[in-house]
Amino acid sequence: MFLTGCSLFVTKPQVVVKAVNFAGINNGGVELEFLLAVTNPNSYNLKLMGYSYSLFVSALPLTQGEKREVVEFAGNATTDVKLPVTIAFQELLGILNNRPDFDHIPYQLKADLDLQAPFGRIAIPVNKSGTFAVPRRYQPSHILKQINEYLNRN
């Protein structure tokens, strides 16, 4: 009941996905980074205490997670927040089986932001969809071309 009452005093921040960046490949899989712009329309600061998320790519549920991270959202201002996501190699096979357009891969990001306001804590749901591009050097056709060129030189 207190959380509901608290939300009456807080205007919900607006969240926009500014970019989805391909951050690289590591032993765990492919790293993506969602750059979110969070606009706090309130005259007072809000504090991000953490978040949880689920990521769907090409309509396939790929990964989910949560992180405790403190970020201050100044009143009447927009703050950028990076949300790192790792997609396991095994999960990538499901995407590759759909033969996607690597320049326009659809995603859906569902997240809950845990915010601390002067009146208590509130959860802000985020549900954003869009597309992202895989850099050419990481696309399978480019990698296969490099392997072929290497084999033809030797």
Image: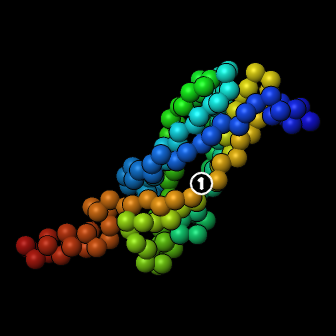
What residue is shown at x 42% (from left), y 66% (from top)?
A: 104
What residue is shown at x 50% (from left), y 53% (from top)?
A: 86
What residue is shown at x 68% (from left), y 26% (from top)?
A: 42
Residue pushed farthest right?
A: 1
Look at the image and tell me in which quarter the N terminus lies: top right
Can you tell which quarter of the image residue 74 is in? top right
Looking at the image, residue 132 sits to the left or right of residue 43; the answer is left
Residue identifier under label 1? 128
Can you tell which quarter of the image residue 16 is in? top right
Residue pushed farthest left?
A: 153
Mark 1 residue element: strand
Residue 23 drawn at (x, y percent)? 39, 49
Q: Is residue 26 visible?
A: no
Q: Dot 1, how many residues are within 10 Å of its Cα: few (below 14), some (14-19), or many (20+)?
A: some
Residue 94 drawn at (x, y percent)? 51, 73
Look at the image and tell me in which quarter the C terminus lies: bottom left
Looking at the image, residue 62 sits to the left or right of residue 149; the answer is right
Instruction: Give the total number of marks visible in the rendering.
Output: 1
